[in-house]
């Protein structure tokens, strides 16, 4: 793509209970089954501090999570989520290589839009999720914590995923 394409389509989140949005994702039990994951209001408020994170959520996470090709369980580093000091042990990492990246164009005092870009070379997209033992009263099975690009390999998996994550849960043919 020679020039970044400006995206101006509207987006309305699926607000339910404490979630700013709830979306479909492959299940960690069966990669061919779908579950609902939510982004809590406070998590999205943190993401809003950088417009690019918002653009990536709208156009990569929200519509791309169902295309994940790898799922890993457990971060091999400390991670705290709310009062859970060992959250990293349970965290799930959904991974795939999106066709595009997105950045936020404009500022808080002007009309702003996400801009479609060529994805960064040799990187894959990772969405970290805190799974629940059972779906909550809203039918949500886990909470989306954060998302970002990381160095990837030819299988569209993070480089050194054996060191980064505790174990693979599933992989789809890529």
Image (cartoon, rainbow, N blue to C red):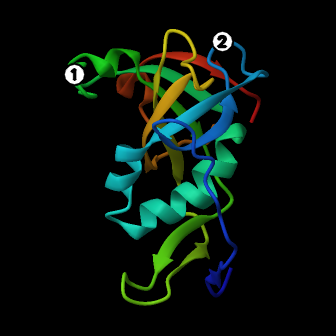
Q: Is residue 61 left or right of residue 32?
A: left
Query: What element does badge 1 sit on?
Result: loop
Q: Tell me residue 47's x, y (percent).
A: 37, 55
- Nearer the observer: mark 2 or 1; the answer is 1
Which residue is rendered at x = 54% and y = 48% of the image?
Answer: 124
Which residue is rendered at x = 54% and y = 17% of the image?
Answer: 168
Which picture quadrant has residue 77?
top left
Q: Is residue 166 left or right of residue 5?
A: left
Q: Tell me residue 144's x, y (percent).
A: 47, 36
Residue 122: image tag: none
Q: Is residue 89 left or right of residue 162?
A: left
Badges 2 and 1: C-beta atoms under 8 Å apart?
no
Which of these two is toward me, 99 or 111? 111
Give the class, few, some or many, for how many residues have Cα within 10 Å of label 2's Cα (few <14, many ≥20): few
Q: Quadrant of the C terminus?
A: top right
Which picture quadrant has residue 107?
bottom left
Relative to 119, is 77 above or below?
above
Q: Tell me residue 108's x, y (percent).
A: 37, 81
Which residue is rendered at x = 64% and y = 60% of the image?
Answer: 12
Name the residue beneath numbered marker 1: 83
Which residue is rendered at x = 62% and y = 18% of the image?
Answer: 28
Q: Is residue 158 visible?
A: no
Q: Quadrant of the N terminus?
A: bottom right
Q: Estimate the spatial distance between the alpha carbons at disc 2 and disc 1, rounded to whole Å.
A: 26 Å
Query: What element does badge 2 sit on?
Result: loop
Q: Tell me residue 63's x, y (percent).
A: 69, 50
Name the residue beneath numbered marker 2: 29
Which picture quadrant has residue 85?
top left
């Amino acid at each position: 793509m020679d020039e970044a394409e400006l995206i101006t389509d509207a987006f309305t989140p699926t607000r339910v209970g404490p979630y700013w949005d709830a979306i479909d994702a492959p299940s960690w039990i069966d990669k061919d089954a779908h579950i609902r994951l939510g982004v809590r209001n406070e998590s999205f408020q943190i993401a809003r501090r950088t417009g690019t994170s918002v653009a990536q959520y709208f156009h990569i996470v929200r519509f791309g999570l169902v295309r994940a090709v790898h799922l890993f369980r457990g971060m091999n580093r400390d991670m705290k989520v709310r009062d859970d000091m060992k959250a990293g042990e349970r965290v799930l990492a959904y991974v795939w290589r999106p066709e595009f990246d997105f950045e936020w164009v404009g500022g808080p005092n002007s009309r702003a839009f996400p801009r479609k870009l060529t994805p960064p070379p040799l990187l894959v997209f990772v969405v970290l999720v805190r799974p629940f033992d059972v779906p909550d009263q809203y039918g949500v099975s886990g909470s989306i914590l954060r998302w970002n690009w990381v160095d990837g390999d030819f299988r569209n998996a993070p480089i050194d995923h054996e060191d980064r994550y505790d174990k693979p849960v599933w992989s789809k043919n890529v």
